[in-house]
Image (spheres, rainbow, N blue to C red):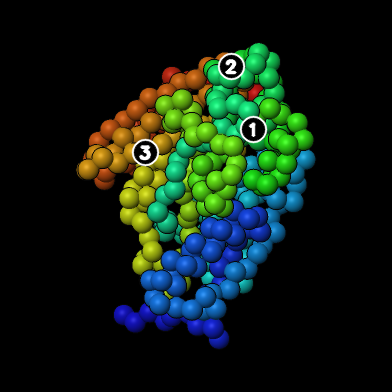
Amino acid sequence: MTIRLPSPTAPLKIGTRGSPLALAQAYETRARLGQAFDLPQDAFEIVIIKVTGDAIQDRPLKDIGGKGLFTREIEEDLLAGKIDIAVHSMKDMPTIQPDGLILDVYLPREDVRDAFISPTLSGIAGLAQGATVGTSSLRRRAQLLHKRPDLKVVEFRGNVQTRLKKLDQGVAECTFLACAGLNRLSMSDVPATPVDPDDMLPAVAQGAIGIERRMDDTNTADLLAAIHDTPTGQRLAAERRFLLTLDGSCETPIAGLAKLDAGTLTLTGEVLRPDGSEAISDTRSGPIADGADMGVDLANDLLKRAGPAFFDWH
């Protein structure tokens, strides 16, 4: 079957949020497609779409609707045919897509680790008793308070640049960002120390870029197949099924990471009480093809051990 290639007169429209990191991810997608099919840059059009999650910066995500706030408007434009594909940070993505859309293409995964950001310190251990830490992530908040219940955690929303500015202003003594975002933005000047996943298990799908399309758009499916990274897809199949089974959202402190070694997939998952008072984690290993089933099994086991009131905020 012949693939109909985009061109300067009929460009492939790539939908994205407007933050510097979101644009970097869209540019990477454009570059990979251009290289795969030897296409000029103007065979693609980057379409910036304003999303609610970026517009509202003064309230926690759990108070205004969770993960869908970063995707809803983009997916509406995709369904309406205003764009051809949507590029997403996978850790922001709900586990279920709207009818008519599919998310099954991933770029090679970046560094999965969290980065500890401080101009003077190199890790959590160096924080003084009662120090103030800035983060908008319920997962990071719970993980920090589990290790250091003495810390004061304050809300820290916004893109990478906004959070770094808040740090400079002394709103907090440190914050955390994803290593992947710093790498994609070439921000080697940021005072960042990677945190071992054994010390802070990352968010499900952290470091991965996903590309969403209309289910009936077979030509675009054929285009995207050329840039899909199979190992990333295998890891995310396990992680996202784990999250789906937990019914995870931005309102729930959940962490998960799948690793591949030859033909074996190892999935580690963690659930935490929102105040950090308790954390439950476990690991499953098996054939890569069983990754999704392992995600279900691990999630059900953690749910059973946690009990019905584990995630209660009140």
- Residue that sits furthest to the bottom in the current view: 9
Give yes or no for contact between labels 3 and 1 (Cβ–Cβ under 8 Å): no
Q: CA distance from mark 2 to mark 3?
A: 26 Å
Residue 169 visible, this orientation = yes
Residue located 57% across and 48% down the image: 187
Secondary element at image label 1:
loop
Please state the total of marks drawn on the protein image: 3
* Residue located beneath label 2 in the image: 148
Amino acid type assigned to the residue bearing label 1 in the image: Pro
Q: Nearer the viewer, residue 246 or 69?
A: 69
The disc labelled 2 sits on which kind of residue?
Arg
Give the quarter of the image for residue 9. bottom right
Q: Residue at x 37, y 41 (%)?
A: 238
Mark 3 or mark 1: name the one nearer the start of the chain.
1
**Cα distance, mark 2 to mark 1?**
20 Å
- Residue shown at 36% from the left, 56% from the top: 229
- The C terminus, quarter of image: top right
Between the residue at mark 3 and the residue at mark 1, the CA separation in whole angstroms equals: 31 Å
Q: Amino acid at mark 3?
A: Ala
| Residue that mark 3 sits on | 258
* First reached walking from the N terminus: tag 2 or tag 3: 2
Please tell me whether mark 2 or mark 1 is closer to you in this view. Answer: 1
Residue 228 position, x and y percent, is 37, 60
Image coords of residue 286 (percent x, y): 25, 36
Secondary structure under the numbered disc 3 in the rendered image: strand
- Seen from the viewer's position, the closer of residues 178 and 237 is 178
Q: Which residue is mark 1?
A: 119
Residue depth check, mark 3 versus mark 1: number of the one nearer the observer: 1
